[in-house]
Structure formats: C-alpha cells, structure tokens
Image: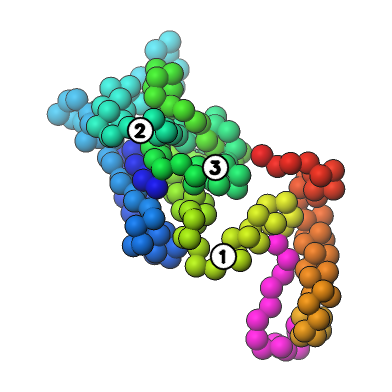
Amino acid sequence: MKIDVIAIFPEILEMALHVGILKRAIDRGLLEVCLHNLRDFAEDNRRTIDDYPYGGESGMVLKPEPIFAAVRSLELKETTRVVFLTPQGKPFNQKMAERFSLGTHLILICGRYKGVDERVREKLITDEVSIGDYVLSGGEVPALVLIDAVGRVLPSALGDYESAQNDSFSRELLDHPHYTRPAEFEGMRVPDVLLSGHHQKIMDWRRNRSMEKTAEQRPDLLRKFKNNEVLD
Ligand code: 6GU
C-alpha cells in the first residue's frame, strides 16, 4: 500500500510514521507513506495556495492549480483513490478502513481554511471523508487517523492476528474490560471468573460486559446489534 499525502503542514504527520505499528508496517515494506507540501506546487514566488472565495464570503479557499499540479506529479493507477479530508465527507469507520486497506494506492488531500475549489472535487476526488461531527482546523490530523486505521489492518501489519479479529467484533459491540496482574490491587480484585480457567464462562462474561458497556456508552450501536443490522 502506497499513501501519498498532500498537505499544507505535512510535518504534523511525520512523527507518527516513526513509531509503533505504522513504523513496523513501513519497515516491513507493507506500507509506504510519502508526504508532500502543497506549497511546493504553488505557481508564484510567494507560494500562494489559497485565495478569496468568489461571491464574497469570509474565509479562504484552496486554489485549484497547486492541487492539480500536486496530484499530476504522482503516478496514478487505475485503482488509485483520491481522498479529500473534509467535515463535509462521509463519516469514517472501521469498514471504510478495511475497504481502503484492500487497495494499493491512496492519495490523501488535506483541506484547510474554508475548503477547496469545487473543480478539484469534480475532477480529482473519488472519496470525501470526515472523521466525526466536529470541526478541526485542517485535514492533517484526520489524514493521520485514516493512515493509522488503514495501516493497522493491512494484511500482516498487526503482529497479533487474533487482536485484529477481536476488533471486528468490537465494531458491533464495544470492547469488554481487561485486567492484568496483580490479581488484587489496592483492595480491588480481578473478577474470579477470569482466574477460573473456565473458557466458556470467561467468554460469556466478556460478552455480557461488552453488552453492558455498549448499552451505557453507545445505545445506538446496541440497537443496531440487536436488530442484526449490518454496519457500513
Ligand atoms: Cl476530515 N477535516 C476537518 N477540517 N475537520 C474535521 C474533519 C476533517 N473531520 C471531522 N472534522
């Protein structure tokens, strides 16, 4: 999987590529991430990338020329997906991460300011993605969220295959609580069932705690789960 990121502040993403699962995926050659600074594709000496919106409203809009030049500088494949990170996009979720991870080339365009000239959306963009219902100052952090979520589900990026399997269960229900040693800490004991060695009882306990947690925090997910709705 190759991911090209076009951003005004690509340095926001830099550090995250050098730690943890993303670093390991990159070291193993499963993932390649190239960061591109949009200003490098500006046409003037002042490296201008934005301008006032036509029709008179507040804020600035990203100009089309530098974005077209940046995308055209990249090698496009038939299957390349060009993703624009914007609060106006489709809400990102685990299913989308898994779908993206099946491809081989993503171009992520990070918005800033009011957004992007509509002609970029018309001609270049295949997907618009939002990471949630709140407004961030730019698409760099959302791009990092997408890269992290996609990177960790790339085939064999996750050392522990089982924990990836558990993730897809926790897409329907929230995860159950976890404990590690010591068995008693400051008077708080690990539930006896987890020490019992009784596999079926442990599985039942986990299932019940997942249901409780989901009822508390995400009644919307629990309703879908009970109605057997497919999450997309
Ligand atoms: Cl993708 N971009 C910005 N600027 N804000 C957001 C977002 C994206 N997703 C949620 N909020």
**Range drawn in magenta:** 175-191
| Upstream in sequence: badge 3 or badge 1 | 3
At numbered mark 1, what does the secondary structure look like: helix, strand or loop?
helix
Q: Mark yes or no: residue 138 visible.
A: no
Q: Are marks 3 and 1 in contact (CB under 8 Å)?
A: no
| Upstream in sequence: badge 2 or badge 1 | 2
Measured in 3D between alpha carbons, the distance from the residue under mark 2 to the one under mark 3, in whole angstroms, is 17 Å
Q: Are marks 2 and 3 in contact (CB under 8 Å)?
A: no
For badge 1, the amino acid type reads Tyr
**Side (left or right) of 123 relative to 34:** right
Q: Nearer the viewer, residue 19 or 99?
A: 99
Q: Position of residue 148 (x, y in %)?
A: 47, 53
**Side (left or right) of 50 relative to 57:** left
Q: Nearer the viewer, residue 100 or 69?
A: 100
Quarter holding residue 197:
bottom right
Measured in 3D between alpha carbons, the distance from the residue under mark 3 to the one under mark 1, in whole angstroms, is 18 Å
Up the image or down, 26 lies above or below 147; here it is: below
Tag on residue 69? none
Q: Main secondary structure of the magenta part?
A: loop
Q: Position of residue 85 (x, y in %)?
A: 47, 36
Tag on residue 77? 2
* Dot 1 alpha-carbon crowd within 10 angstroms: few under 14, some 14 to 19, many 20 or more: few
Residue ID at (49%, 56%)? 155
The residue furthest top is 55
Residue ID at (52%, 35%)? 129
Circle 1 residue:
161
At numbered mark 3, what does the secondary structure look like: helix, strand or loop?
helix
Tag on residue 99? 3
Measured in 3D between alpha carbons, the distance from the residue under mark 2 to the one under mark 1, in whole angstroms, is 30 Å
